Amino acid sequence: MTDIAIIGAGPGGLLTALRLHQAGFRPTIYESVPELKPLGVGVDIKTVGTKEIDELGLLEEFRAISVDAEDSIFYNHFGQEIYAEKCGVHMGYLHEQRFVHRGVLQMLFYRTVLERLGAGSVVLGAKAVGYTQDEEGVTLDIEHRDGTTSQVRHEAVIAADGIKSAVRRQMHPNQAEPEFSGITMWRGTTLREPFRGGHTILHLGDPRISSMIVYPIAENFEGTGLDLINWVVETNGEETIEDWNQVADPEQIIPAFDTLKLPFLDVQQLIRDAREVYLFPLIRHFPLDTWVDDRVVLLGDAAHAMYPRGGNGITQAMLDARVLTEKLVELADPRAAFAAYDGARREMVNRIADNMRGEGYEVIRRIVADRTDGKPFDDIEDVLPLAEADGIFSRYHALVGAPRPGHDAGEATGFRTWNEAAPAEAR
Ligand SMILES: Cc1cc2nc3c(=O)[nH]c(=O)nc-3n(C[C@H](O)[C@H](O)[C@H](O)COP(=O)(O)OP(=O)(O)OC[C@H]3O[C@@H](n4cnc5c(N)ncnc54)[C@H](O)[C@@H]3O)c2cc1C
């Protein structure tokens, strides 16, 4: 079987290694950092992502580190409810939608790679800086932490080296420069009592001013009896470097939520009590016209860096891993397999990345803000009828490859939490 190198031990690279191993391959991973640490904050794993984890035999371990998503509720800048939908199995999907700490999930994948593929399968402190290739294989140039360099040779290379991918830069030297969107993201976590039973994702605010997403990523965190709550605020902001680990002071964003009052959560206090806050600029990376250079292929954020909204970065990396492995099993020549993967995935994922840049389903909060001129409303049905909101959500779920169960049969799937006519499961 093809001897494969994977560049990057992020969730995308590690999951690809596990998928390939399940199919009989023995890949080697090269990772630039000398030690993997559980970095990042929360990610929202959609049902299709949970299915991938299940198929790797990791569902129980995943459940132990994550939180089942039951419902998703949208509010305007005054804490008035706009719309709600059920999530995952509560909506009728076959798999759960779950919330988890990105780094904790990465560590689960990492431990599993070491157990299944062996300790030698991950080479740490090995930064890939370039490649050359010929008819038989690829030579990777590796830079080590002590400044020395070496070369390794494999029959094919999968580059999962993230948003600043060195391989993507070499593959697409004339690619348009990424552009700052004007939006800054503040990502934080806070320990507190569970809100609304501990399984809800909240979407808050007027996107013309500031938006906030809030969801729990760990129950009884480290035995404290408290939930670890993940929150993300988007504001109009200055451009900063595209770095996941930029520490920020949350005080500046607290006034942006002056008018937002919820009966079950003080959002300003949530921000004030943060354990950690990171700044991340939303940068527009332009879609690529190919992910393949013969025996070298891009995967995950390296292929399709997208706004980290809606859990799509990580879930789409998992789907990349699945399709790429299937193609490598079907087609003995990795060049043919990589081309088939590109054909199966690229256009669809580029459409998702595009949708994420326009607000995806979060657009309903903008519609409400525009139609009410940023003021409180009397009856949401006069502003955004349930059927119209349902249509927006159904189109979104279909776009990301998980059409809403029941929608084609004409069933109403969204609801308002106070509405007694909601689907029984949803009340
Ligand atoms: C530190 C960090 C924190 C993050 N936090 C969040 C978050 O809170 N929320 C969110 O939605 N997304 C976050 N992400 C992004 C998220 O992980 C990805 O969108 C998604 O999981 C797809 O992952 P990936 O494996 O393609 O890329 P990444 O997760 O970016 O992983 C890429 C890996 O490649 C390694 N690497 C980079 N360059 C090289 C090189 N030249 N040679 C060898 N190895 C290299 C990196 O060290 C990293 O381990 C974070 C990413 C990182 C790196």
Image (spheres, grey):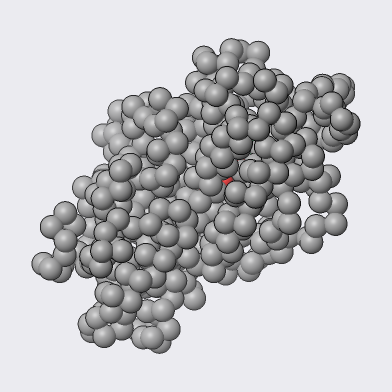
Q: Quadrant of residue 68?
A: top left
Q: Is residue 262 left or right of residue 47?
A: left
Of 372 and 338, which appears nearest the observer? 338
Q: Quadrant of residue 151?
A: top right
Of 204 and 368, which appears nearest the observer? 368
Residue 48 rendering spot, x and y as whole percentages? 42, 44
Of 369 and 249, which appears nearest the observer? 369
Residue 69 rendering spot, x and y as whole percentages? 31, 47
At x 54%, y 31%, the residue is 15
Residue 411 rendering spot, x and y as whole percentages? 23, 65
Residue 421 rendering spot, x and y as whole percentages? 12, 68
Number of labelled discs?
Answer: 0
Question: Residue furthest toward the left?
Answer: 420
Q: Is residue 103 left or right of residue 92?
A: right
At x 74%, y 36%, the residue is 335
Of 427 and 139, which appears nearest the observer? 139
- The answer to whether one can see residue 195 in this image is no
Can you say which quadrant of the picture contains the N terminus? top right
Can you say which quadrant of the picture contains the C terminus? bottom left
* 377 relative to 17, above or below: below
* 226 relative to 303, above or below: above
Q: Quadrant of residue 320?
A: top right
Question: Residue furthest toward the front?
Answer: 331
- The answer to whether one can see residue 102 in this image is yes
At x 38%, y 86%, the residue is 371
* 144 relative to 66, above or below: above
> Where in the image, quadrant-wise, is ligand 1 located?
top right
At x 63%, y 68%, the residue is 182
